[in-house]
Image: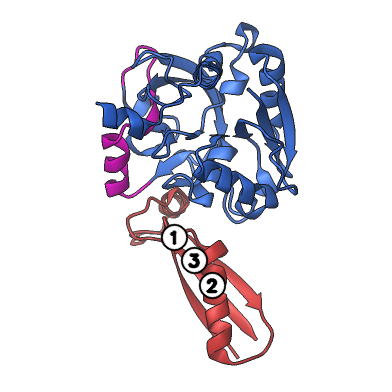
Amino acid sequence: MKAIVTVRLKPGVLDPQGVTISNALGSMGYSGVDEVRSGKIFELTLDNGDVAAVRAKAEEIADKLLANPVIETYTVEVQP
Amino acid sequence: MKFGVVTFPGSNCDYDAFTAVRDIVRQPVEFLWHGDADLKGCDLIILPGGFAYGDYLRAGAIARFSPVMKSVIDFANSGGLVWGICNGFQVLLEAGLLPGAMLKNRSLQFSCRQVYLRTENTTAPYTRHLEPGTILEIPIAHSEGNYYAPVKILDELEASGRVAFRYCSADGQLGDQFNPNGSARHIAGILNENGNVLGMMPHPERAVETILGSADGCRLFDSVVKSITAGSAKSISDQARVA
């Protein structure tokens, strides 16, 4: 079973990578891209089991290690 | 006074700190291995600069779970002196011993150069023997030193005198042009509530001899040694109560 953990910077937290990518898009000639926010995706392969239990485990892992709650939020998607 | 310097896999300033303490500060010093929980009876633990565990995931995020850190966290929470320098500061933030987090430098570049710091706190053991506003020339070398914390936390840090150092000009002026990484309110170093835990991005251990460009880092080592050997290690909160 897979759990996909997506980690994003909280709204309002400066994202220097996103700003730099956004500036690059401007210089590449793309108009109308108002903002770019960067993030990370983790694909966890976990023992098969109850979807709720797998989700709970992935959320605990995201909470303790994958995301820093001071600056980041995360979402978990379980793929049976 | 016995110093301990932690070596994580990827630490690269552990020897700088070790030799600074041994040869310049002239105090007993031992290396502490990341895989051992034993702090060997040290009075002050230095978490050195480098790239602990490759800085994978986030700087300090993996190091924070190493066996030595369990002991360091207990030691800090019982009032022991813990000094995180550069990557060590990042480890302290990830461990929750200090509030906030580090973002990538505003420039997105690794920045390695001399900077000036204004001493804001003069009650903690590390700074007690400096005059308020003392300007120190000390190098930085990092790509994630852009300190971030919610406004409420920043206000609390300032109100309680827990901002240890701010980036400044050679004559102590504050401004974005003197802030090398975009750090909130020009913060270069902060203390915990009791003043026993200090995290700072600049490297005092690289500024201990004039041949290195500056010996200003000695001021901090001298202060902490004097504070501890004099047995007058009053916490910031103790001082506040007296005031």
Answer yes or no: is residue B111 visible.
no
Q: Amino acid at mark 1?
A: Pro
Residue hosting label 3: A7
Instruction: Identify the residue at horizontal 50%, vertical 45% (top origin).
Output: B77
Chain in red? A
Instruction: Check the image and report above or below for B160 versus A25.
Output: above
Of the numbered discs 1 and 3, the one sitting upstream in the chain is 3
* Residue type, numbered disc 2: Glu
Judged from the image, the secondary structure of the residue bearing numbered disc 3 is: strand
Please state if A42 lies on the left or on the right of B30 as rendered: left
Q: Are marks 3 and 2 in contact (CB under 8 Å)?
A: no
Q: Which of the 4 image quadrants contains residue B83?
A: top right
Identify the image quadrant of the N terminus of chain B: top right
Numbered range of the magenta stretch: B149-173
The secondary structure type at the circle numbered 2 is helix
Residue under numbered circle 1: A69
